[in-house]
Image (cartoon, rainbow, N blue to C red):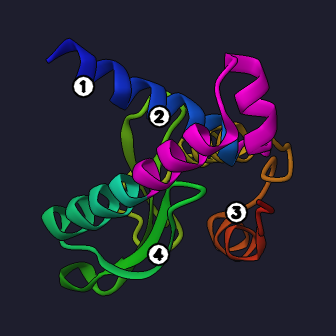
Amino acid sequence: MSENRFANEAQFIYWNLRRGMLSQSGIARKFHITRQSVSKSVKIQERNVVIRLLDCAQVSGIMPTYYDPVLGILIGLIPPLGNLRCILVIDDKNDSRIFYDPAANPDIDSSLSTQKELNGILNTVCLTKDFDGMNFEKAIDHLKKIKRGV
């Protein structure tokens, strides 16, 4: 059982480094393993990320409009709340976080600190400072434009 847990932790570590723009070859060198092992682990983890994002979306009543398994993000709408926009993120600690569009519904925590927290997580996930000062809508647009190389 501990072997499975280690494999899952290793897969998450490789995937997290990969989404941070470290090449598969670079990850392989760092951990003294083959690039093929990294590739296989990353593919398994990306499949797990898709399943997790879609499961979290279903449980939360989110209708996905976009998801990216490389970044670990899902953008969607919550129909029962008037199509409230939200971003679901798997952060660098492997926790799922949901952020709601603060401008769309003032009843939901719309504090500036929530937007700053979201921007901070997106900066960490994407290894950039591009999200500093962005509002929710601009963050969504920027997320959809990020392309990762292999």
Q: Name the kind of residue labelled 4 in the image.
A: Ala
Residue 83 percent coordinates (x, y): 33, 86
> In this view of the protein, which residue sits in the foreground, 14 or 106?
14
> Distance between the Cα atoms at labels 1 and 4?
42 Å
Mark toward the viewer: 1 or 4? 1
Q: Name the kind of residue labelled 1 in the image.
A: Asn
> Distance between the Cα atoms at labels 2 and 1?
12 Å
Under circle 1, the secondary element is: helix
Among the two numbered marks 2 and 1 on one chain, the one whose residue lies closer to the N terminus: 1
* Number of numbered discs: 4
Residue 32 included in the magenta stretch of the image: yes
> Distance between the Cα atoms at labels 3 and 4?
12 Å
Q: Name the kind of residue labelled 3 in the image.
A: Asn
Mark toward the viewer: 4 or 2? 2
Circle 3 Cα neighbour tier, 10 Å, few/some/many (<14 / 14–19 / ≥20)? some
Q: Tell me the residue that label 2 is attached to.
A: 12
Among the two numbered marks 4 and 2 on one chain, the one whose residue lies closer to the N terminus: 2
CB-based contact (under 8 Å), mark 1 and mark 4: no
The span picked out in magenta is 20-46
Among the two numbered marks 1 and 4 on one chain, the one whose residue lies closer to the N terminus: 1
Under circle 2, the secondary element is: helix
Mark toward the viewer: 3 or 1? 1
Residue 11 percent coordinates (x, y): 46, 35
> Distance between the Cα atoms at labels 4 and 2?
33 Å
Residue 44 included in the magenta stretch of the image: yes
Q: Tell me the residue that label 1 is attached to.
A: 4
Circle 4 Cα neighbour tier, 10 Å, few/some/many (<14 / 14–19 / ≥20)? some
> Distance between the Cα atoms at labels 3 and 1?
40 Å
Among the two numbered marks 3 and 1 on one chain, the one whose residue lies closer to the N terminus: 1
